[in-house]
Amino acid sequence: MTDFRTFRTSDGLRLHYAVDDFTDPWRPAETLVLLHAAMGSVDRFRGWVPTLARDFRVVRLDTRGHGRSDTPDTDAVTIERLTRDVVELLDDLGCASAHVCGTSAGGYSAMSLAITEPARVRRLALYSSTPGLKHSTADVATWCRIIRAKGVGGMIADTVTARVDPARVDAGFIRWMIDDAQKMDREFTCRFLTAAKGFDLAPRLHEIEAPTLIVVPGADVVGTKEGYELLRRIPRHEYVVYEGMAHNITNGAPERCAADLRRFLLDRGSTS
């Protein structure tokens, strides 16, 4: 049974998160925080939970403006604020440190947390995440024109083959992904994407102390090869390529993603 919760951020927003914990109650459970991609939600990780929740307390956060979390009215989106949201989530959980996994834009917050609050990140995992949307082919101005005309779901529909291979995922998932994204506020999404295009964590990657799993989709046309290669600056890392996979491996290969993450987190000799 998923436990749905909310907490109030220091700037007044109500953020939603989900907790799945099937660990043995007589043993202390490590916490694993999952951070979804832009225009996604906690539901994007549903396929991961069965593999992970037996060994970890799995916590999935709806990023501000996404899913069931509040949407800020006019504030600027900053990497500092997104990182603070994760810190405040950990505080709400009463969790001094956790494993943190980010996919695509969720990886920006994960990397930033590992850089600025190293004591709070035990192990880090990055899926389809360059060190900022700057290191991508994303044409945010065009995306925003489509979003304002057709909604966020309309933009996802127009660019779906860059995100998932329709031959590899259920057609029902694609329809659901589009419908779910359509619920998002158009102007907030444009603010979020415009801000993310300016994020660049590359100069500070060498500061990440946590052992890190890097998973790269080999056929990605969103994140650039050069952007992914920058992640090799992280001192202790394992670099994995999913050959032939499109950008959104979170849903293109959920069982494989979760299995690799579980292996990495349980193998304490990895990248040490």
Image (cartoon, helix red, strand yellow):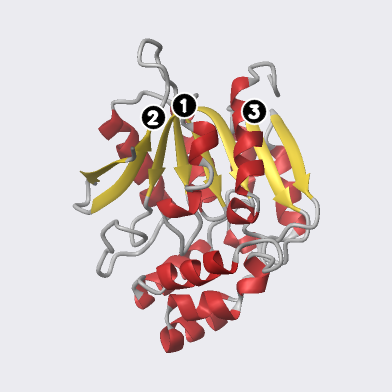
Is disc 1 in contact with disc 2, using a CB cutoff of under 8 Å? yes
Is disc 3 in contact with disc 2, using a CB cutoff of under 8 Å? no
Q: Is residue 38 above or below residue 122?
A: below
Front disc: 3 or 2: 2
Quarter of the image that includes the N terminus: top left
- Amino acid at dot 3: Phe
Q: Position of residue 213 (x, y in %)?
A: 66, 35
Kindly tell me whether residue 140 is visible in this rendering. yes
Q: Secondary structure at mark 2?
A: loop
Q: Quadrant of residue 207?
A: top right
Read off the residue under disc 1: 56
Q: Is residue 193 above or below residue 51?
A: below
Q: Position of residue 228 (x, y in %)?
A: 72, 51
- Amino acid at dot 1: Phe
Read off the residue under disc 2: 21
In the image as oriented, which residue stretches furthest toward the bottom? 149
Q: Is residue 261 above or below residue 65?
A: above
Q: Quadrant of residue 141?
A: bottom right
Q: Position of residue 270 (x, y in %)?
A: 70, 22
Read off the residue under disc 3: 264
